[in-house]
């Protein structure tokens, strides 16, 4: 029943910031997905008889690849596969299942915040036994293997019915089709004060969540509507659809604008949140106040002890390098560790496992903690509701008092999407060449203090990750950072991150883009971005 199939390698299966992402037609090529899945298995050791978790965000091609992965796991010798009903598992839910049931690892099918559909994006990611994304050592091995692979193994059996909960046999391997939501909800109930949040909602605080036609719908409905008593319909776009109902499931001010406008309107809800394709990102909006993800991390850390799961305090905070330094000030005040990592959740895993960091965050709408090893969108939403309930304050009040205490880090990211790859690479190379001459140079009132290409030395395993972003730091705490995206599927995306620290509370009400205007201009001057890319403005500003 186990068939060995000859194949020829593809040269483009290099995992990026978060797994392998390609357009569906690329993944649908004969043997393409199989090659990559076999390359994962070939890079792992000692998993015979162990459990593999499989699930995805429900996007187009999810079910097809899940069937292949199950049959290949059986052929590879796994003892058991746990798969979410309908092929559904949000990324944080998958991480939880891996940890809770002590699985060997998991395969998550998602291209996260990228659109879905027959000509849109798909992705495959491998997570290790701690529930987190495979570290570079493993993703490098997978890529190396994918370039030379010549056979894969697959069980020749009929497709499994993914919609029926229960235990089945696939070529001698057990497959358990599980409720994708139950374990996750149980975990959230342990971490947060559900009775207080329930009371907050009952008191008339109107909460809405936009699931953007992606995976969080079933999770959000169970938590917000069933457990916390919000009226039916509080979760919008709640059914996961293969094309996300045409939504671009990226929770930011561009793609979740409808929700934002609604919360900002006088009669709209008091609190709104949105999540991405696979449920690991979050956007938090309160009436009159959009919360930047960097501020969200800082505020969650500063208020963490209000949540029962964090009542004993947090051990440390970790943030990706481009994320604003708002959380650093909280760590300083709490006298706890602060860790600055490269972009991508895989770099937090060691810090979380070692107990060095409890909460982590990225400027890209990602926040999470040691409860799983992925960022977690609904976790962040519940944390905010728990803080609001405990402090009896609105989002706006909480953010403003945080700024008054710690100062405000004005922050924005400008993305230039689908630019010519050569132009983007040349821009980074040219910046790298300039680094040594920048310190001491002045641009108007801004004087460069230091400039480098960020390299991370993992304090736990000693591994080194180089070329993680060009940073130019100015005297007084302002900075600009340049890096290329590792999640896009066409052309290159240049990300420019801009930050200014403003301690003076009388200057906390300036429009963000205005507050950063001089830095934005200097970023262009130093990088020559507009000339090099032919673009006169960013594709997306967050
Ligand atoms: C982006 C974000 C990064 C995030 C990654 C995966 O990566 O910037 O912070 O970890 O997406 O998020 P990049 O390389 O395109 O900048 V998800 O929700 O797409 O898995
Ligand atoms: Co995501």
Image: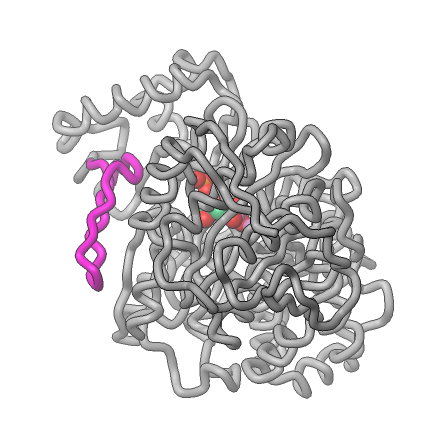
- Magenta stretch: includes residue 465: yes
Which residue is more in the foreground, 293 or 228?
228
Q: Is residue 430 left or right of residue 273?
A: left
| Magenta region | 452-473
Give me the residue at 37% from left, 23% from top.
Answer: 524
Give me the residue at 43% from left, 19% from top.
Answer: 421
Residue placed furthest toward the front: 1
**In the picture shown, does residue 115 fall above or below 108?**
above
Give me the residue at 43% from left, 33% from top.
Answer: 150
Residue 484 drawn at (x, y percent): 39, 32
Residue 220 drawn at (x, y percent): 72, 66
- Magenta stretch: includes residue 501: no
Taking the image as drawn, is residue 471 in sight?
yes
Taking the image as drawn, is residue 402 in sight?
no
Give me the residue at 56% from left, 45% from top.
Answer: 3
**In the picture shown, does residue 69 fall above or below 486?**
below
Q: Is residue 311 left or right of residue 431?
A: right
**In the picture shown, does residue 246 fall above or below 94?**
above
Residue 106 drawn at (x, y percent): 51, 59
Residue 443 drawn at (x, y percent): 26, 27
């Amino acid at each position: 029943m186990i068939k060995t199939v000859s194949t020829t390698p593809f040269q483009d299966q290099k995992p990026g910031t978060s797994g392998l992402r390609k357009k569906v037609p690329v993944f649908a090529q004969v043997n393409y997905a199989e090659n990559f899945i076999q390359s994962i298995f070939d890079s792992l050791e000692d998993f015979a008889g162990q459990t593999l978790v499989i699930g995805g965000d429900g996007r187009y091609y999810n079910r097809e690849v899940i069937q292949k992965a199950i049959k290949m796991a059986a052929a590879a010798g796994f003892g058991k596969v746990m798969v979410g009903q309908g092929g559904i598992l949000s990324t944080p839910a998958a991480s939880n299942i891996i940890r809770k049931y002590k699985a060997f690892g998991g395969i998550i099918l998602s291209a996260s915040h990228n659109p879905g559909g027959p000509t849109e994006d798909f992705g495959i990611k491998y997570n290790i036994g701690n529930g987190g994304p495979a570290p570079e050592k493993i993703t490098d091995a997978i890529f190396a293997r994918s370039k030379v692979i010549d056979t894969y193994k697959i069980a020749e059996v009929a497709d499994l019915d993914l919609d029926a909960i229960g235990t089945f046999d696939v070529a001698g391997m057990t497959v358990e089709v599980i409720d994708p939501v139950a374990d996750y909800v149980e975990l959230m109930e342990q971490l947060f004060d559900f009775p207080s949040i329930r009371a907050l909602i009952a008191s008339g605080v109107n909460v809405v969540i936009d699931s953007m036609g992606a995976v969080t719908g079933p999770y959000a409905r169970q938590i917000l509507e069933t457990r916390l008593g919000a009226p039916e319909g509080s979760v919008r776009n709640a059914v996961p659809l293969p094309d996300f109902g045409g939504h671009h499931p990226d929770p930011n001010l561009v793609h979740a604008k409808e929700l934002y406008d609604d919360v900002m309107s006088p009669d709209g809800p008091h609190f709104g949140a949105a999540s991405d394709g696979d449920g690991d990102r979050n956007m938090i909006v309160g009436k009159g106040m959009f919360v930047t993800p960097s501020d969200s991390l800082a505020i969650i850390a500063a208020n963490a002890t209000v949540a029962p799961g964090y009542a004993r305090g947090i051990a440390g905070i970790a943030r990706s390098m481009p994320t604003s330094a708002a959380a650093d000030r909280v760590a300083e005040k709490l006298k706890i560790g602060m860790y600055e990592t490269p972009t991508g959740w895989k770099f937090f895993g060691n810090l979380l496992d070692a107990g060095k960091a409890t909460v982590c965050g990225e400027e890209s709408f990602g926040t999470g903690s040691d409860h799983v090893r992925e960022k977690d969108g609904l976790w962040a939403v519940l944390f905010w509701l728990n803080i609001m309930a405990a402090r009896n304050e609105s989002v706006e009040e909480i953010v403003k008092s945080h700024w008054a205490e710690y100062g405000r880090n004005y922050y924005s990211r400008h993305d230039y999407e689908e630019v010519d790859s050569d132009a983007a690479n040349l821009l980074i190379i040219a910046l790298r060449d300039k680094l040594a001459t920048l310190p001491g140079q002045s641009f108007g009132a801004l004087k460069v203090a230091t400039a480098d290409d960020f390299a991370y030395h993992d304090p736990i395993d000693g591994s080194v990750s180089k070329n993680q972003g060009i940073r130019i730091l100015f005297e007084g705490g302002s900075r600009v950072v340049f890096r290329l995206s590792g999640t896009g599927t066409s052309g290159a995306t240049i990300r420019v991150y801009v930050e200014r620290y403003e301690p003076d509370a009388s200057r906390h009400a300036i429009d963000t883009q205005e507050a950063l205007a001089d830095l934005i201009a200097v970023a262009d001057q130093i990088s020559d971005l507009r000339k090099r890319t032919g673009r006169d403005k960013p594709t997306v500003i967050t």
